[in-house]
Image: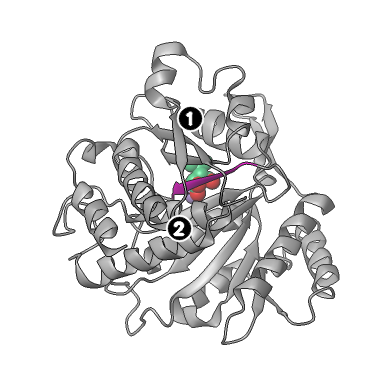
């Protein structure tokens, strides 16, 4: 987007600690916008568990059309202890990803300076790769059903749906991203799938990957089965540059990724619709952590990282980089730990420290 234009962000603080970490991300946005000389405006949307409990709806009629008018969406967290599992996930988060066709879920796995990883002998130079997760298909489509439910003869099916269009657009974007990332250690894109067992759906992914790879002779195409990928992520994370994978596998390996980069307090992601006029949504990967609500102990680094990604991908790459650099100064020199309650300072102080480091 044109840097002279006002950046318009829809803000869904959401449930639990979501609003607290969102506040810090917005604080950092405010500071960096002044330093970089651009203006922004935000509009709050009260979607989440509380609203659902009050009104019975996860997303009101017209909400998606309303959100589409913004340059980007910032989402704090959804998940409420009094709402049954699945309702907010499907009715809000997945609904937005699908309806807005945010077909890329971009999840950097980067160990910041000063952050401890459970991997012995590994440091920031070893843990620095990016997962490109397909975000609209696979087991997430909700295709399936029950037969003879609640009887001893019950049958349940849950189908994975893969389309040529769906995997091709994701794979092509991942190749382009790998090219742009331009890793000095070599540009490598690893397809993570399970072609030895999922001989239909992942065969489609495999063939599409081979086809698209021909358009990118400067990127080394690579393949790992998902189980081996879990092994290498722990044993040799430095092996990876960019990973492209299916929705369900991407969900699983990015939780593993979050752990090796220091936990859910650090991991950020973007649900991206890269098409012209598409609206993308950025979020910390962790949940709403209801037990920490209102205590000023939750780690906002993931939310601030999500804001850095929003800026980077919404036409303000210099501001995004500046925020990322500031985060690393703070993790490297100011924070004791990335765990809630053990940071050595409170949620709002972490936001202040990042602003200070800008
Ligand atoms: C994530 C979450 C979601 C997912 C859930 C909450 C539906 O785990 O963003 O990784 O599975 O994609
Ligand atoms: Mn997940």
Residue 105 at least partly seen? yes
User: What's drawn in magenta, residue-wise?
Assistant: 279-284
Residue at point 66%, 34% (across, down) = 99
User: Where's residue 85, x and y in %?
Assistant: 45, 32
Sequence-wise, the earlier of marks 1 and 2 is 1
Label 1 neighbour load within 10 Å: few <14, some 14-19, many 20+: many
Disc 2 is placed on an element classified as helix
User: Where's residue 207, x and y in %?
Assistant: 84, 66
Residue 83 at least partly seen? no
Q: Seen from this angle, which residue lies furthest top?
A: 55
Looking at the rendered structure, which numbered label has been put on residue 169?
none
User: Where's residue 148, x and y in %?
Assistant: 66, 24
Give the residue at mark 2: 255
281 inside magenta stretch: yes
Question: Does mark 2's beta carbon lie closer than 8 Å to ligand 2?
Answer: yes
Measured along the vertical axis of the image, is residue 295 above or below residue 110? above
> On the picture, is 205 further left or further right than 280?
right
Between 24 and 263, which is closer to the camera in this rendering?
Answer: 24
197 inside magenta stretch: no
Which of the 4 image quadrants contains residue 16? Answer: top left
Measured along the vertical axis of the image, is residue 209 above or below residue 61? below
Question: Which image quarter is the C terminus in?
Answer: bottom left
Which of the 4 image quadrants contains residue 250? Answer: bottom right
Label 2 neighbour load within 10 Å: few <14, some 14-19, many 20+: some
Measured along the vertical axis of the image, is residue 153 above or below residue 242? above
Question: Does mark 1's beta carbon lie closer than 8 Å to ligand 1?
Answer: no
Give the residue at mark 1: 88
Between 101 and 8, which is closer to the camera in this rendering?
Answer: 8
Disc 1 is placed on an element classified as helix
Mostly what secondary structure, the magenta segment?
A: strand
User: Where's residue 128, x and y in %?
Assistant: 47, 74
């Amino acid at each position: 987007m044109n840097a002279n234009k006002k950046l318009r962000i829809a803000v869904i603080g959401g449930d639990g600690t979501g609003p607290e970490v969102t506040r810090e991300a917005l604080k950092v946005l405010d500071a960096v916008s002044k330093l970089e000389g651009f203006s922004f405006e935000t509009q709050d949307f009260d979607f989440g568990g509380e609203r659902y409990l009050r009104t019975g709806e996860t997303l009101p009629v017209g909400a998606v059309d309303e959100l589409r008018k913004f340059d980007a969406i910032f989402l704090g967290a959804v998940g409420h202890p009094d709402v049954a599992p699945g309702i907010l996930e499907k009715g809000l988060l997945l609904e937005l990803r699908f309806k807005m066709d945010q077909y890329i879920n971009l999840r950097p796995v980067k160990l910041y300076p000063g952050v401890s990883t459970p991997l012995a002998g590994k440091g920031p130079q070893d843990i620095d790769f990016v997962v490109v997760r397909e975000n609209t298909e696979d087991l997430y489509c909700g295709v399936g059903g029950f037969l003879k439910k609640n009887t001893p003869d019950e049958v349940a099916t849950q189908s994975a749906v893969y389309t040529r269009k769906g995997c091709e657009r994701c794979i092509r974007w991942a190749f382009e991203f790998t090219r742009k990332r331009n890793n000095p250690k070599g540009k490598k894109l690893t397809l993570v799938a399970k072609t030895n067992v999922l001989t239909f759906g992942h065969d489609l992914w495999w063939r599409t990957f081979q086809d698209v790879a021909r358009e990118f002779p400067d990127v080394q195409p690579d393949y790992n089965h998902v189980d081996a990928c879990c092994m290498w992520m722990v044993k040799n994370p430095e092996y990876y540059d960019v990973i492209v994978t299916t929705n369900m596998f991407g969900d699983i390996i990015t939780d593993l990724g979050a752990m090796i980069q220091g936990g859910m307090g650090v991991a950020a992601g973007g649900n991206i619709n890269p098409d012209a006029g598409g609206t993308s949504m950025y979020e910390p990967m962790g949940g709403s952590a209801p037990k920490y609500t209102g205590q000023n102990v939750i780690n906002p680094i993931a939310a601030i990282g999500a804001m850095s990604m929003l800026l980077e991908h919404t036409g303000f790459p210099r501001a995004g980089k500046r925020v990322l650099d500031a985060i690393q100064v703070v993790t490297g020199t100011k924070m004791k730990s990335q765990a809630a309650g053990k940071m050595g300072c409170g949620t709002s102080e972490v936001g202040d420290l990042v602003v200070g480091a800008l």
